[in-house]
């Protein structure tokens, strides 16, 4: 009994610390924060720091659930304070859309271990060694998305029947994986540069075992029913220009409504970070997608 009490006390203390840190981050960015429990596959319960932003006016508002990427290195993952970029925030809030931005377990001040670790490894020559498990990464991240959606459904300011998933990099992979399952209220998604296994420092433009990602996407495509937009820059330094095309082609065989956009090369070379850049580089494609899907429109 005493051990159980100590474990509970430690968990409550960790959640309290995460909530305080989240409040500081949210206040600085103009949002509000909460911690959401995520029941992990191991049976552990992590506390996920989640920041949300609402536009001016009277709700309930349509909602974008934004899934961040995976910073390289443990130190960078520990420093992740807010998953959504200011460029994305300005775009969505300007359309009267609320934005929910979880920092998944294993990142920032959220508790829990690095459950999204795929095991990818490059040697000093840039060769991919070992066998990564990208499904493990996607499955872990999907649990976070599902927990955030459950929380959204309980918020009075949110239109829980008008939710769009948006993801960047590993968050894009997670978005594709999540939307392959029935998710009440989710009407579509935008995948920015989704994937895993890249290392632009050691292997620029050539990721580790891209065929494994292609097979995952093919499987997700067979069970996806909501429309999707996939956006990759021509100079994506993680995947290169050609592999994303093959990934989407495999997904598209599932016959859901899906569009692939190859955005022009990002001028500063950071094509993989397209979603963080000025909206002029990606908003025309997103605007065109939004005009054809039920998000922001009467159902």
Image (cartoon, rainbow, N blue to C red):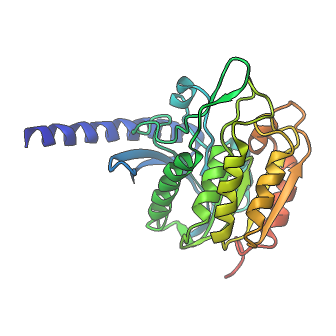
Question: x%, y% of residue 171?
Answer: 62, 48
Q: Quarter-wise, where is residue 200 in the image?
A: top right
Q: Is residue 180 left or right of residue 142?
A: right
- The percent coordinates of residue 234 (x first, y second) are 88, 42
Tell which residue pokes out farthest to the front in this image: 130
- Residue that protrudes farthest toward the left in the picture: 1
Q: Is residue 294 left or right of residue 121?
A: right
Residue 123: where, in percent of width, then height? 66, 21
Residue 111 vs 200, above or below: the answer is: below
Tell me which residue sits at (67%, 82%) in the image. 299
In this rendering, the count of numbered labels is: 0
Q: Please determine whether, in this image, residue 214 is positioned above or below residue 257.
A: above
| Residue 269 showing in the rendered view | yes
Q: Is residue 282 left or right of residue 139?
A: right
For residue 55, say whether it is visible: no
Measured along the vertical axis of the image, is residue 89 above or below residue 164?
Answer: above
Seen at 56% across and 43% down, the residue is 133
**Along the line of sight, the residue nearer the viewer: 29 or 249:** 249
Which quadrant: the N terminus?
A: top left
Q: Who's the residue at 69% across and 17% down the image?
A: 124
Using residue 129 as the reference point, say whether residue 16 is left or right of it.
Answer: left
Of residues 219 and 292, the one nearer the viewer is 219
Q: Position of residue 169 (x, y in %)?
A: 68, 44
Q: Residue furthest bottom?
A: 299
Q: Nearer the viewer, residue 101 or 72?
A: 72
> At 73% from the left edge and 61% from the top edge, which residue is drawn?
95
């Amino acid at each position: 009994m005493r051990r159980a009490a100590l474990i509970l006390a430690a968990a409550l203390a960790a959640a309290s610390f995460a909530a305080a840190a989240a409040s500081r981050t949210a206040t600085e960015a103009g949002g509000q924060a909460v911690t959401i429990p995520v029941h992990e596959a191991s049976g552990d319960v992590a506390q996920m720091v989640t920041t949300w932003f609402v536009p001016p006016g009277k709700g309930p508002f349509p909602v974008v659930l934004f899934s961040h990427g995976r910073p390289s290195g443990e130190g960078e993952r520990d420093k992740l304070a807010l998953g959504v970029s200011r460029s994305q925030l300005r775009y969505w809030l300007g359309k009267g859309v609320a934005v929910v931005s979880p920092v998944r377990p294993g990142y920032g001040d959220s508790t829990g271990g690095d459950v999204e670790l795929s095991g990818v490894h490059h040697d000093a020559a840039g060769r991919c060694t070992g066998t990564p498990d990208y499904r493990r990464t996607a499955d872990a991240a999907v649990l976070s998305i599902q927990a955030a959606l459950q929380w959204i459904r309980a918020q009075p300011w949110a239109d829980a029947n008008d939710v769009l998933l948006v993801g960047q990099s590993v968050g894009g992979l997670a978005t594709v994986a999540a939307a392959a399952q029935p998710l009440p209220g989710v009407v579509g998604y935008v995948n920015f540069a989704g994937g895993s296994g890249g290392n632009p420092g050691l292997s620029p433009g050539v990721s580790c075992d891209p065929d494994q990602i292609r097979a995952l996407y093919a499987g997700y495509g067979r069970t996806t029913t909501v429309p999707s937009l996939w956006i990759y820059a021509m100079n994506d330094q993680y995947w290169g220009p050609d592999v994303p095309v093959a990934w989407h082609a495999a997904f598209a065989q599932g016959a859901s409504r899906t569009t692939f956009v190859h955005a022009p090369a990002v001028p500063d070379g950071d094509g993989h970070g397209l979603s963080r850049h000025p909206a002029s580089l990606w908003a025309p494609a997103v605007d065109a997608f939004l005009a054809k899907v039920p998000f922001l429109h009467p159902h």
